[in-house]
Image (tube, rainbow, N blue to C red):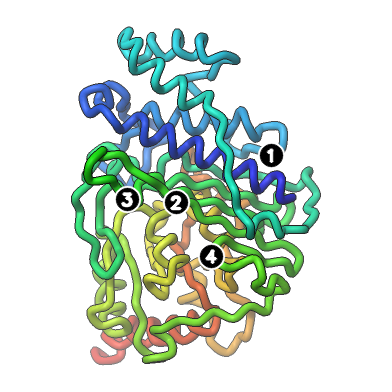
Amino acid sequence: MSEILRELLRVSEKAANIARACRQQEALFQLLIEEKRGGEKNKKFAVDFKTLADVLVQEVIKQNMENKFVFPLGEKVILRLCATEEETVELLSKVLNGNKLASEALASVVHQDVTLSDPTLDSVEVSIPQDILGIWVDPIDSTYQYIKGSADTKSNQGIFPSGLQCVTILIGVYDTQTGEPLMGVINQPFTSQDSSTRRWKGQYYWGLSYMGTNVHSLQSPASKRNGSETQSNPTEAASPHQFSAVISTSEKETIKAALSQVCGDRIFRAAGAGYKSLCVIQGLVDVYIFSEDTTFKWDSCAAHAILRAMGGGMVDLSECLSRPAEAGRGLPQLAYHVENEGAAGVDKWANKGGLVAYRSGKQLETFLSLLIQSLLAPAETQT
């Protein structure tokens, strides 16, 4: 199974190279933007876009992995990659108004072989039946930030509110029978920029969780992989009742008000569902919380798998807030194999109840208890 995970990492690196190559020339990049319409549009945005990078990345991943996975969406792809670099140049030239130099540069990246060395991945020994594997892919998450291309955004305690750093490539693998996330890759193409060449470098993160085997890229090869690995958290150790959270700029006022009672001024705003989840994975915040229904399975599956491998997870916020406190049931983890009944278009795969991403289940229980108290406090005051 390490071979499949390695291939996912390899195609994510190729995808990151494509994302960087498409973003290098501003004038050319503007030719590559198309407005999403109809069923593929996210209702959260007044105008939603996709780019040639989205299509190229999606097609590279599908061509490399389609013989290994079920692709639930079966989306129409407007560009089919060719067998040779020369043929791809000819095809891209038609898309890029005959710009042969740009077409050659992009085709070279598309057909370039990527090698990687990862000692932790080399240590993975687990067998997963290939016929149960499905895959969710978000070729460019936070497309708006990708199109804006801001490179000079300053971080707030390591968290970028916007900018190219918020762009991620998300590949999540799940069990088609149970809906559980099994493997996840998050590639962040724009992590640091060379001040002299202006070229960007990226970083990838991965995790695998299956039948008691939990391994991820943020641990050393010698770390335990039997599910008993403990997570240290500076926030938890210093102040068990003081949490930090990352949220969307569009979060509801009621949630923001309740969060302020739980987190104080340690609430951070950031773009991109993938990036906000990555902030939890990196330990920059305790939770990522989102109360609306405008994230989708392709936004959450990759991060969910990584968090699961770390001892955390991703749960349905609405179910968490409504479940009886004394029920003693397990946390309502997001699942990835069933459509939302009665929904149409992309809403069939929306995370309808919102979500909470976390690293520690025990910490999450305390956080949810305090959040519920804060949400109920105004009503109790009025009665």
Quadrant containing the C terminus in the rendered view: bottom left
Q: Taking 382 as reference, is 309 above or below it?
A: above
Question: Which of pointers 4 and 1 lies earlier in the amino acid sequence?
Answer: 1
Q: CA distance from mark 3 to mark 2?
A: 9 Å
Question: Which of pointers 3 and 2 lies earlier in the amino acid sequence?
Answer: 3
Question: Which callout, 4 or 1, points to the residue nearer the camera?
Answer: 4
Q: Taking 352 as reference, is 287 above or below it?
A: below
Q: Position of residue 240 (x, y in %)?
A: 41, 91
Q: CA distance from mark 1 to mark 3?
A: 33 Å
Q: Position of residue 203 (x, y in %)?
A: 44, 51
| Secondary structure found at label 3 | strand
Which residue is at 44% across, 39% downward? 16
Q: Which mark, by number, is residue 69?
A: 1
Question: Which of pointers 1 and 2 lies earlier in the amino acid sequence?
Answer: 1
Q: Which mark, by number, is residue 203?
A: 2
| Secondary structure found at label 4 | loop
**Closest to the observer, 87 or 30:** 87
Residue 24 visible to the viewer: yes
Q: Amino acid at mark 4?
A: Leu
Dividing the picture into quadrants, the one containing residue 68 is: top right
Q: Amino acid at mark 1?
A: Phe
Q: Which mark, by number, is residue 192?
A: 3
| Residue at far front of view | 196
Residue behind mark 4: 218
Which residue is at 27% across, 21% downward? 31
Question: Which of pointers 4 and 2 lies earlier in the amino acid sequence?
Answer: 2
